[in-house]
Image (cartoon, grey):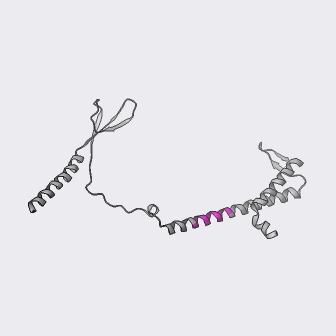
Amino acid sequence: MNIRNSASIALWSAVIFSTNVIAKEIAIYRWVDENNVVHFSQHQPQNENYSQLTTVSSYQAREKELPKSARRLSVDDQLAKYEKDKAEVLAKNEEIAEKNCKAAQLNEKTLNSFENVMFTDSDGKNRALSDKEKKAQLALSKKHISQYCKNENAKKD
């Protein structure tokens, strides 16, 4: 029995180590063709302008610890992260809406306070808004107020 086990172990060891030796001795050829394309192959190219590379195989790969960003999160951790991200986005959206609300209110106040409202056109020239343009800008400002000033509209009601 011992001879059979020893022979079996020896045979398997020879097979395992021989595959590593074979893998170490594989030649890889590298060449550049007439179109400047780099090629790699285990078969020797026809032309004589090539480099021969050899492979190095490792017997045992080391286990590498993943960075925190690549680790798998539990469902609870994923949910907590989602809720935190959602709260941050909502806070930023509220901040932007508040700025837009103040700008729209200031535009409405300016349009209502002055008979002639000056603005700079796309050519960089200053000119007064016509009555039609002023009404359109006032309607636009009111629409922006209704969109961005929801909290203040709720307070007024």
Classify 85 as above or below 117. Answer: below
Q: Residue furthest right?
A: 115
Is residue 91 on the magenta stretch?
yes
Along the line of sight, which residue is nearer the eye, 126 or 150?
150
Quarter of the image for the N terminus: give it: bottom left
Residue shown at the point (25%, 55%) measured from the top left: 59
The quadrant where residue 141 appears: bottom right
Whether residue 78 sits left or right of residue 137 in the image: it is left
Residue 130 appearing in the image: no
Residue lying at 24% horizontally and 47% vertically, measured from the top left = 23
Snapshot quadrant of residue 66: bottom left
Position of the C terminus, as image quadrant, is: bottom right
Residue 103 vertical position relative to residue 123 in the rendered view, above or below: below
Q: Which residues are magenta?
A: 83-93
Q: Position of residue 88 (x, y in %)?
A: 61, 65
The picture places residue 41, in percent across and down from the top left corner, at 31, 38
Secondary structure mainly formed by the magenta segment: helix
